[in-house]
Image (cartoon, rainbow, N blue to C red):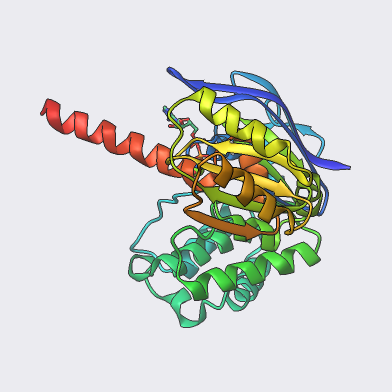
């Protein structure tokens, strides 16, 4: 049974189309990863799921409830840990958790038991009785997670739970997520860390520009891609015609199953090959056509390859492009001052 069903979600903020027909289903007990670059629509999706935001159109069902008609019912079923959480810095972690427990009408004895359990599992130790304003980023995040889990929700929604954290906090959070998985809590987690999604998620959806571009288990997605990946860098092509010519040349080689021209950040050629012996032919053909190979890397298929296949750019390049855009906006704002 699918515990979360999103169908054809559309959300526009002024002029930005944040979601463009996003659909996905999360089975019960699954740890589901939403992977996508900055601005892909992950937070918007999670905010809609947590009933904090209404979509312009589309359907949202959570544990059989229509989230648009029964947001209150849905909120009892879910725990939501936002990307950035504002908390009262004067209160201690324990006081904040007690308040959260009261909000959910937990009996004080149950609430206190639950707090002890979470403090132990999240390795918060004596920090729980210190003011939250003194917490490190990692400790803050652990408190956020405890807050989301206090009422033992059936479904946990996490927006980038480990972004920017120290190694130890990340490990603690990963451990807790693995435990939740074995306890059959359904978890939907967004991340732009490939390795995080790969290490934790049973199933993933890759999101790009507000829609799902690939979906399934990591193994299935990688299997769809076939053999070894090879990335080659040659000199930049002067135009589209030239790049297409080189692509055709390489596609003709026996054992080369796929050629993608990666246009972001200069040019590189990404090939899928049946076996590594094919590489000597690739080298020979490129040399004949007077393309010197500057760099060559070979690897097993990764999630980044899945992304590249679907979008023509790597996840890293997509993030750099967004960062570049941000810097440009900043520069023009400063120039206007
Ligand atoms: N309140 C808002 N007003 C205007 N545009 C917004 C607003 N919130 C998000 N957007 C835009 O909607 C798009 C999707 O944003 P969203 O925050 O859902 O992406 P994301 O995948 O969570 O990105 P990140 O990895 O940076 O957190 C982006 O282009 C973003 O700039
Ligand atoms: Mg986000």
**Is residue 169 visible to us here?**
yes
Q: Position of residue 331 (x, y in %)?
A: 20, 34
Q: Nearer the viewer, residue 305 or 48?
A: 305
In the displayed structure, 121 sits above or below 156; it is: below
Q: Position of residue 287 (x, y in %)?
A: 55, 46
Answer left or right for 25 relative to 100. Answer: right
In the displayed structure, 167 sits above or below 210; it is: below
Q: Quadrant of residue 184?
A: bottom right
Answer left or right for 100 relative to 133. Answer: right
Q: Residue at x 53, y 63 (%)?
A: 97
Q: Nearer the viewer, residue 116 or 258?
A: 258
Answer left or right for 183 relative to 260. Answer: right
Q: Nearer the viewer, residue 318 or 216?
A: 318
| Direction bottom: furthest residue | 126
Q: Residue at x 59, y 18 (%)?
A: 56
**Is residue 81 visible to us here?**
no
Q: Quadrant of residue 88?
A: bottom left
Say which quadrant the N terminus sits in: top right
Q: Nearer the viewer, residue 121 or 222?
A: 222
Say which quadrant the C terminus sits in: top left
In the displayed structure, 211 sits above or below 57; it is: below
| Direction left: furthest residue | 337
| Direction right: furthest residue | 1
Q: Residue at x 74, y 50 (%)?
A: 273
Q: Position of residue 158 (x, y in %)?
A: 60, 51
Q: Position of residue 228 (x, y in %)?
A: 72, 55
């Amino acid at each position: 049974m699918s515990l979360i069903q999103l169908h054809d979600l559309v959300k526009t903020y002024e002029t930005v189309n944040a979601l463009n027909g996003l659909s996905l289903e999360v089975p019960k007990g699954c740890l589901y990863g939403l992977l996508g670059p900055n601005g892909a629509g992950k937070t918007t999706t999670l905010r809609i799921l947590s009933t904090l935001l209404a979509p312009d159109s589309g359907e949202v069902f959570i544990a059989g409830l229509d989230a648009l008609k029964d947001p209150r019912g849905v909120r009892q079923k879910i725990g939501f840990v936002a990307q950035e959480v504002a908390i009262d810095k004067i209160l201690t972690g324990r006081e904040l958790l007690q308040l959260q427990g009261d909000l959910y009408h937990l009996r004080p004895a149950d609430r206190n038991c639950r707090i002890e359990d979470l403090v132990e599992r999240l390795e918060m130790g004596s920090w729980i009785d210190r003011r939250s304003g003194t917490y490190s980023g990692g400790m803050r995040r652990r408190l956020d997670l405890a807050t989301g889990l206090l009422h033992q929700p059936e479904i946990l929604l996490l927006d980038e739970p480990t972004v920017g954290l120290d190694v130890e906090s990340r490990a603690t959070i990963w451990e807790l997520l693995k435990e939740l998985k074995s306890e059959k809590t359904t978890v939907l987690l967004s991340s732009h860390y490939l390795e995080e999604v790969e290490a934790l998620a049973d199933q993933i959806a890759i999101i790009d520009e507000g829609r799902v571009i690939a979906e399934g288990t990591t193994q299935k997605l990688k299997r769809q891609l076939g053999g070894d990946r090879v990335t080659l860098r040659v000199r930049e092509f002067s135009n589209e015609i030239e790049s297409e010519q080189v692509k055709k040349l390489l596609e003709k080689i026996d054992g080369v199953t796929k050629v993608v021209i990666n246009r972001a950040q200069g040019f590189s050629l990404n090939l899928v090959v049946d076996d590594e012996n094919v590489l000597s032919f690739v080298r020979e053909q490129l040399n004949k056509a007077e393309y010197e190979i500057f760099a060559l890397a070979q690897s097993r298929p990764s999630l980044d390859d899945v992304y590249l296949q679907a979008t023509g750019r790597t996840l890293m390049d997509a993030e750099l492009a967004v960062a570049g855009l941000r810097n440009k906006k900043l520069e023009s704002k400063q120039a206007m001052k």
